Image (cartoon, helix red, strand yellow):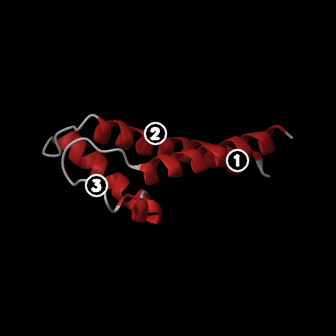
């Protein structure tokens, strides 16, 4: 794998992982969705969690919630990042 491609893929993947992990924490602590920063993060991360949104269909709309689909996506993304990092070493 080209070193530059792996470097940029790792940077983009890390940014996506940080956004998704922030979403999990914000929703777990029931942050107010009318806060502009929280609203921005939730709207940006909504598109990232769409592939696994079906897992959380029974979650409450308001209040504290634990999105299992988002956590699953974080785990998968972390595994891919570790795999790319290992390819970068070789």
Q: Could you say whether the residue bearing mark 2 is in a helix, strand or loop?
A: helix
76 lies left or right of 45: right
Q: Residues within 10 Å of mark 2 (few under 14, many from 20)?
A: few
The answer to whether 32 is drawn above or below residue 73 in the figure is above
Dot label at residue 43: 3
Dot label at residue 6: 1
Residue at image point 43% right, 40% down:
21
Residue 51: % across, % down: 47, 65
The answer to whether 85 is drawn above or below residue 76 in the figure is above
Q: CA distance from mark 1 to mark 2?
A: 18 Å
| Residue at the left extreme of this rendering | 34
Residue 61: % across, % down: 21, 54
Q: According to the image, label 2 marks what residue?
A: 18
Q: Could you say whether the residue bearing mark 3 is in a helix, strand or loop?
A: helix
Q: Residues within 10 Å of mark 3 (few under 14, many from 20)?
A: few
83 lies left or right of 69: right
Along the line of sight, the residue nearer the viewer: 30 or 87: 30
7 lies left or right of 54: right
Residue at image point 38% right, 49% down:
67
The quarter in which the C terminus is drawn is: top right
Residue 88: % across, % down: 78, 42
């Amino acid at each position: 794998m080209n070193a530059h491609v792996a470097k940029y893929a790792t940077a983009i993947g890390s940014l996506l992982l940080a956004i998704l992990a922030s979403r999990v924490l914000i929703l777990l602590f029931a942050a107010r969705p009318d806060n502009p920063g929280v609203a921005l993060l939730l709207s940006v991360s909504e598109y990232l969690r769409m592939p696994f949104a079906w897992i959380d269909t029974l979650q409450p709309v308001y209040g504290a919630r634990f999105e299992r689909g988002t956590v699953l996506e974080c785990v998968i993304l972390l595994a891919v990042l570790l795999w790319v990092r290992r390819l970068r070493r070789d």
